[in-house]
Each structure stands twice: as structure tokens, then as C-alpha cells.
Image (cartoon, grey):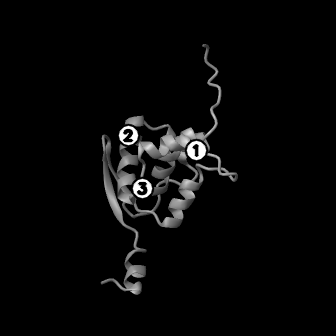
Amino acid sequence: MLTRDDLNKQASVVRYGVVTLAIGQLCIRSITERERNEYEGHQVDDEGQVQLEEVARRRARLVCLCAVGEDHRPLFSKDEFAVIEGWDAGILTTAYEGIRAHCGLDASKARVEAAEKNSEATPDGGSA
């Protein structure tokens, strides 16, 4: 059985992995629970309302947070998600899904749909 010291020592080690993209391999890292809370916190405002714009950016934000070079140093600062939003959608999706699995994040459609249902609808500006 693991002891408290074993858990604190082993569970706090950053894990690295690789995601294969259509254009090559991307080195990725795991995140801490603190980083996960900060990442997920961007999707809700101070009043607890879901921010749809931030929900839409979740994929780019996670790639920005977890993409590292071979030296395990971040490839992007945490605020450079706008750069990643300009990537090919298929490449971004593959990177996001690989990172999500590596980090053990639940990205089920039901969870996203529930968040969208709990937010206020906005006019789309289209004609009827």
C-alpha cells in the first residue's frame, strides 16, 4: 500500500508524453489539480455564469498550457492561446484530444452541453 509520503512524492511528478499530429509529434505534459482548476475557471465568470467565448477557447487554452519542447519547457506562454486558435482545426482537435486523455480530463459532450444549456441564449444576428 502507498503511504502518504509515497503519494506526495509520486503523484506530484509531472508526466510527459507525445501526441502524433498530421504534421509531426508534439511533446506534452500533465497538469496539476491547481492548473486544472485555473484552466476550468476561465469558463465561468465571478457570478458563476458560463462564458461561452471561453468555453469555445478551452481546446486552445489546454494545448497552450500543455505543449512543451523536447527540453520540457513550455512552447507557449499561458496567454498565447490566440496563436493556437489560428491552427488548422483538425490538428488542434488531435492535439487537444491527446492532451485531454493524457491529463485525465473529462471532456464529454454532455458536460459541455449542460454548460451551454445553463447559459443565456444570445441573438445570432441572422435573418429568420
- From the viewer's perspective, tell me whether residue 69 is left or right of residue 116: left
Location of residue 104 in the rendering, given as x and y in whole percent from the top left corner: 38, 58
- State the SS at label 1: helix
Sequence order check, earlier mark of 1 and 2: 1
Residue, disc 3: 105
Residue at far right of view: 47
Q: For label 3, count other residues whose C-alpha is less than 10 Å away and answer few (under 14), some (14-19) or many (20+).
A: few
Q: Amino acid at mark 2?
A: Ile
Quarter occupied by residue 66: bottom left
Q: What is the number of the mark on residue 24?
A: none
Q: Is residue 32 above or below residue 128?
A: below
Location of residue 24 in the rendering, given as x and y in whole percent from the top left corner: 31, 46
Q: Is residue 75 above or below residue 82?
A: below
Give the Cα separation between the discs numbered 1 and 3.
Answer: 17 Å
For the residues bearing labels 1 and 3, Cβ distance under 8 angstroms: no
Sequence order check, earlier mark of 1 and 3: 1
For the residues bearing labels 2 and 3, Cβ distance under 8 angstroms: no
- From the viewer's perspective, tell me whether residue 39 is left or right of residue 19: right
Q: Is 72 in front, or is 16? A: 16
Q: Amino acid at mark 3?
A: Leu
Residue, disc 1: 54
Give the number of the mark in front: 2 or 3: 3
- State the SS at label 2: helix
Q: Residue at x 37, y 77 (%)?
A: 10
Q: Is residue 50 above or below residue 122?
A: below
Residue, disc 2: 91
Sequence order check, earlier mark of 2 and 3: 2
Q: Is 113 in front, or is 24? A: 113
